[in-house]
Amino acid sequence: MIDFKENIDKLYSMMDNCNICPRKCGVNRNKGQQGLCKTGNKIFVASINVHTGEEPPISASNGSGTIFFSNCTLNCVFCQNYPISQLGNGKEISLDSLVGSILDLQKRGVHNINFVTPSHYSAQIAKAVYIAKQRGLVIPIVYNCSGYENVETLQLLEGIVDIYLPDIKYASDEIAFKYSKVKNYVQANQIALKEMKRQVGDLTVDQNGVAKKGIIVRHLVLPGNINNTKNTLKFISEELSINTYVSLMSQYHPAYKSNEFKELSHSLSLQEYNEAVDYLEILKLRNGWIQNL
Ligand code: SF4
């Protein structure tokens, strides 16, 4: 039996000496100090709206109720949303207002509440969902994250999150450090994804194809890094499951500081994306989605 109140308290106390994510900055966020994610004890949100462009079981017919948080625990040079993740665009909202927004989105008929870039706000999200459930929230919760997660944080989110939608950005720490200035991405990411899988299993949908529970793994194919993609897919097939739903994304475009790296300064080629798609087939990863280039 999960004691949600106790888990929420534990999440908040992790911010005393912050180790909410694997950066483990050690700052006291409850007193307003900020670590690498530039986030103290206030909540900043960049947008709240109905999103129709997520994977089909997430957006489905009525859309996904998306709450997009400001700032991020990673510093990816190619971030496609850098004004929000790196420049901190967004406005402050209270926890009460977050609860109200969740319930408003549900009233608008969305299929789920989709927290985007949620990791540094895990405690506040858990509390807001707990309160919203007491006030009538019944639709699934989606945790749409970078995959750079502290497994202890995830364990405290068990029963709060229904659908995990993590990235696997890298299968190499060398590349992770080069592009995202992070030293332990691969180990943290792989342990985190196994924990997500343990909690919610493979994706399940209702009779209309709408996601109810499970994990969907996203991977953005980076130009000039096909081996990173192949090793990522290998991890999924060998250590998660060949039934895993994989969203193989081709939408990379040079953004933020990507021009500092020659291989990232242009879009993905059709040849590279096709090679990634072929590799899905070689590994028999047949669940999920590919995109048009
Ligand atoms: S959540 Fe922010 S302050 Fe806490 S460990 Fe991660 S980056 Fe550091």
Image (spheres, rainbow, N blue to C red):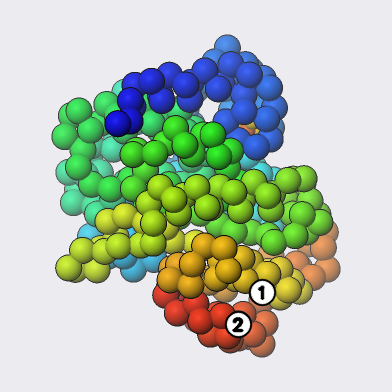
Task: Kindly identify the residue that appears in the image at 52 percent across and 18 percent down.
Answer: 13
Q: Which mark is residue 239?
A: none
Residue 144 appearing in the image? no
Task: Tell me the residue that label 2 is attached to.
Answer: 279
Three-letter amino acid code at disc 2?
A: Tyr
Residue 272 picture quarter: bottom right
- Whether disc 2's CB lies below 8 Å from ligand 1 is answered no
Which residue in the rendered view is the most extreme toward the top? 31
Left-right relation of 209 to 184:
left
Residue 263 appearing in the image? yes
Ligand 1: which quarter? top right
Q: Position of residue 133 (x, y in %)?
A: 23, 33
Q: Which image quarter is the C terminus in?
A: bottom right
Query: Mark 2 near mark 1, Cβ–Cβ under 8 Å?
Result: yes
Q: Position of residue 105 (x, y in %)?
A: 25, 44
Q: CA distance from mark 2 to mark 1?
A: 7 Å
Task: Kindly identify the residue that appears in the image at 24 percent across and 68 percent down.
Answer: 209
Q: Which image quarter is the N terminus in?
A: top left
Instruction: Answer above or below: position of 92 versus 110.
Output: above
Left-right relation of 204 to 121:
left
Label 2 element class: helix
Task: Tell me the residue that label 1 is attached to.
Answer: 230
Task: Kindly identify the residue that appears in the image at 31 percent across and 55 percent down.
Answer: 213
Q: Position of residue 280 (x, y in %)?
A: 55, 80
Three-letter amino acid code at disc 1?
A: Lys
In this view, the residue in front, 185 or 66, is: 185
Task: Kindly identify the residue that appears in the image at 66 percent across and 74 percent down.
Answer: 230
Q: Rate crowding at label 1 as few (under 14), some (14 to 19) or many (20 or more) other CA atoms within 10 Å.
A: some
Q: Earlier in the sequence, mark 2 or mark 1?
A: 1
Q: Position of residue 73 (x, y in %)?
A: 63, 39
- How many discs mark residues in the rendered view? 2
Left-right relation of 106 to 232:
left
